[in-house]
Image (cartoon, rainbow, N blue to C red):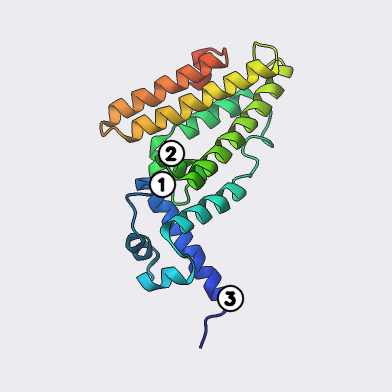
Amino acid sequence: MPYSKAHKSLSKDRILKSAGELFARYGFDKVSIGQIMKVARMTHGAFYAHFESKQALFKTYLSDALQRSHRPRLAKEPFSIKHLTALVTDYLNLGALKDRTEPGPESVLFNEIGSDKDDIRQLYEQSYERMKTMLERRITALSRLKKLPFKPEPTVVADKSRSILAAMVGAVAIAKSISREDEQERILAAAQGQILSILELPQAQLA
């Protein structure tokens, strides 16, 4: 008897969730279809009922995750410095990135910096532009509310957003490649301080 649409949908979701966990931890190239299906507790052959290749699965996972992640993490939160700095602290929490059972698309894309696959690079760019736009809107609003010590000039805000993203992504990418936890913590703490400097805020803001 053929499986129902509901059963097929649940099976596909299990594969996507398992793939997301593994891609976030190890990256696209180091994860096999067999590993994904083992985590999903499904047979290897069941994979091809839903995806034609590992790359097709990766693209589907990221596309779906990017759509879901349009959640208003920045846009609908209170217009406060406390929220913005809390976001930075959370984003630079390496333990959360490692242990998260449902990683966001950015967590997965950390492992694919410099990918030579055109479709993955395109998804990375989409994620980057989405995050940059959210930061620009938040920084502009806080500046207009006089909660940041600079005028909300578009070029200034855009450059600060780029610098913040570079600090965040770069710090996590480097920290994930180092085994010493004390050095990981110093890298992330340094990035937090750098971001406060970009926002022209005192270091005590992250205390």
| Left or right: 26 as drawn, with respect to 145 | left
Residue 179: x %, y % from top left: 26, 34
Q: Which residue is found at the position 59% from the left and 46% from the top?
A: 69
Task: Measure the alpha-carbon separation of dots 3 and 1.
Answer: 28 Å
Residue at left offset 50%, top offset 66%: 12
Q: What element does badge 1 sit on? A: helix
Residue 192 at x, y = what percent?
46, 22
- The answer to which quarter of the image holds residue 85 is top right
- Label pair 2/1, CB-CB below 8 angstroms: yes
Q: CA distance from mark 2 to mark 3?
A: 34 Å
- Amino acid type, label 1: Ala
Q: How far across and how far down the image is residue 78, in percent?
A: 68, 31
The three-letter code of the residue at mark 3 reads Lys
Dot 3 falls on a residue whose secondary structure is helix
Disc with the residue nearer the chain's start (2 vs 1): 1
Q: Give the residue at x 45% y 63%.
A: 15
Q: Which residue is mark 2?
A: 110
Local crowd at mark 1 within 10 Å, few (<14), some, or many (≥20)? many
User: Which numbered marker is on residue 24?
Assistant: 1
Residue 5's disc number:
3
Asked if residue 115 lies left or right of residue 122, the reply is left
